[in-house]
Amino acid sequence: MLFVLFLSMYLVTVLGNLLIILAITNDLHLHTPMYFFLSILSLDDICFISTTIPKMLMNLHSHSRAISYAGCLTQMCFYIIFCCMDVMLLTVMAYDRFVAICHPLNYPLIMNARLCVSLVLLSFFISFLDGHLHMWIVLHITDFKELEIPNFFCDPSQILDLSSKDTRTNAIFKYVAATIYGFPPIFGILFSYYKIISSVLRIPSSEGKYKAFSTCGSHLSVVCLFFGTGLGVYFASAVSHSPRGNAVSSVMYTVVTPFLNPFIYSLRNRDLKSVLSRLLKPRADIRR
């Protein structure tokens, strides 16, 4: 039952994100910075969910929970890279909406192709550094070659908690990593939406306010879902030490969020919805 459920969610997630990428690449009207970042986010979501679900499906099918030492390190590294990439892309997309709403006349000049590509490359570089920083810490302060992890994947925080001999160093690293990689993106998103709301409230007509808010509604929904489930995982592990509860929280964060993202963007975005409907609509028979 679990195998069928997670396999279905995985296939729907991959297919939904691939359809978004296909729609954006095939329609010239969607060749804008907002949809460029969305296509990268969809690709990242595919990679993010692919770091955990395929291995979990193999374990469910074979009734074995074992994973090799090298396999665990690899899974953990890619999990951190793609998770951090998600955070960075959501921050970049918030900045894009800030420029589009607060500086509409200069938007094409500011959000040019070079800056868009540079922001994506910078996001990947920061994510790459974050993944390898975690790897370095794990390799130097832990010893988990024989370790039972109460989760369906190699969760970095649980590995540090269970195998670290120096709890003080472990705690310091967690706070430093959260400060460096967590607070700046959250602050950037909050600041962007503060400026967006301030600008929108100055629009005299209600129709103009609705149109401005509608351009960032999908992104705001994904931000709330991503950070909401992420904070839920953090507080659940801090308050409750139940392995089952932590595993359920991790499923919400690593599986449900990428699963819902295509639905949020396709259902709340009129342009994307129309392009997807044209792609999926069967072509009429050619008259002879």
Image (tube, rainbow, N blue to C red):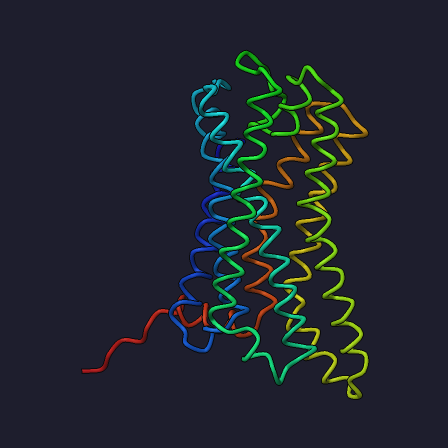
Q: Residue at x 56, y 49 (%)?
A: 85
Task: Specify the quadrant of the image occupied by residue 165.
Answer: top right
Residue 220: x and y in percent read: 68, 61
In the rendered image, the residue lying farthest to the left is 288
Residue 196 seen anywhere in this rendered image of the structure: yes
In this rendered view, identify the residue nearer to me: 55 or 81.
Answer: 81
Residue 63 seen anywhere in this rendered image of the structure: no
Residue 95: x and y in percent read: 64, 66
Q: Residue at x 63, y 76 (%)?
A: 100
Q: How many numbered discs, if any?
A: 0
In the image, is 44 to the left or to the right of 188? left
In this rendered view, identify the residue nearer to me: 231 or 85.
Answer: 85
Picture layout, residue 172 above or below residue 43: above
Task: Specify the quadrant of the image occupied by residue 211.
Answer: bottom right
Q: Residue at x 76, y 63 (%)?
A: 191
In the rendered image, the residue lying farthest to the bottom is 204
Residue 250: x and y in percent read: 64, 35
The quadrant of the image that shows the C terminus is: bottom left
Residue 248: x and y in percent read: 66, 33
In the rendered image, the residue lying farthest to the top is 146
